[in-house]
Amino acid sequence: MPKAQSPEPKADHDHQEGWKGWDEYADFYDWENAQTLDRRDVKFWQGMAQRVTGRVLELGCGTGRVTIPVARTGADIVGVDRSEEMLTHARRRIKRARLANRPSWVRSDIRMLPFRKSARFDLVMAPYGILQSLVREADLKATLESVSRVLSARGVFGLDLVPDLPVWKEYRNRVRFQGSRKGSESRITLVESVRQDRARRLTIFDQEYIERRGAERRARKFSLVFRTLSVPEMTSRLERAGFRISAILGDYNGKPWDPRADVWLILAQKC
């Protein structure tokens, strides 16, 4: 069982915290991802969960995009997210799914996972670049130490990196997506700007979601920030945190990794 949440680390005001913006994003996350990533990584994480016998933990579970399909395999899975808005959407989705085997949702900072020493997970998953929202080195170090603490002796830590962040072109006020919200008469437009802070190796997405329903118009603005991490950089940090790298993959079907791969997946175990 999770214990009481620890105090939040003090913010560094030199740049935006990586967790900011996600509450505002929650209303639009599933709509956007249905048009981009959608479900192409889901089978991979389902397969990973089916290979273990114990509990599974997902870091940054969001609206349950991966958590709920993994639960469908019969896995005993816990989803952790800092955003209460994201978890609210996850709870709504699980009600609609009517699963007999329901995931557990825990609101917490992944830098300080709130589980007692007796709680152990055979698989910890970090899908879709969630660790790249840790914008400072200290944030990543704390998260890896936290994962190591809750991972079982033979457990697996699987993480997914987004490879193209540093080459994302900068632009301003570009209409990225337009479409209707499923099951609603409203129509959504995403207007996006991208900035690169190369000194800090950050990519910042300034988002404006405009939702129209008849004559009613609502606009929501926020920013999301992600840090560039290469596979060698991440593997060295994992090793310093006491992990042994067991595989590096270049797609969700097990293809070997190379720097040009569309997907960067790292699997590690505790030494």
Image (cartoon, rainbow, N blue to C red):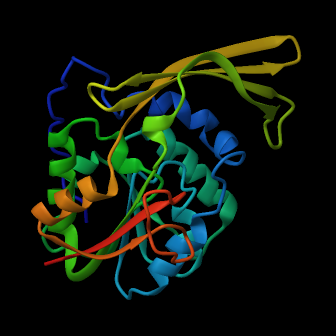
Quadrant assignment for the N terminus: bottom left
- Residue 139 visible? The answer is yes
Name which quarter of the figure residue 262 lies in.
bottom right
- Residue 241 visible? The answer is no
Front position in the image: 22 or 5: 22
Q: Residue at x 15, y 44 (%)?
A: 6
Q: Residue 14: x percent and y percent? A: 22, 17
Q: Is residue 138 above or below residue 210?
A: below
Q: Position of 185 compared to 61: left or right?
A: right
Q: Position of 209 compared to 148: left or right?
A: right
Q: Residue at x 63, y 52 (%)?
A: 37
Q: Residue 49: x percent and y percent? A: 45, 79
Q: Is residue 184 above or below residue 43?
A: above
Q: Residue 263: x percent and y percent? A: 50, 59
Q: Residue at x 80, y 19 (%)?
A: 212
Q: Is residue 253 above or below residue 236?
A: below
Front position in the image: 39 or 233: 233
Q: Residue at x 80, y 12 (%)?
A: 216
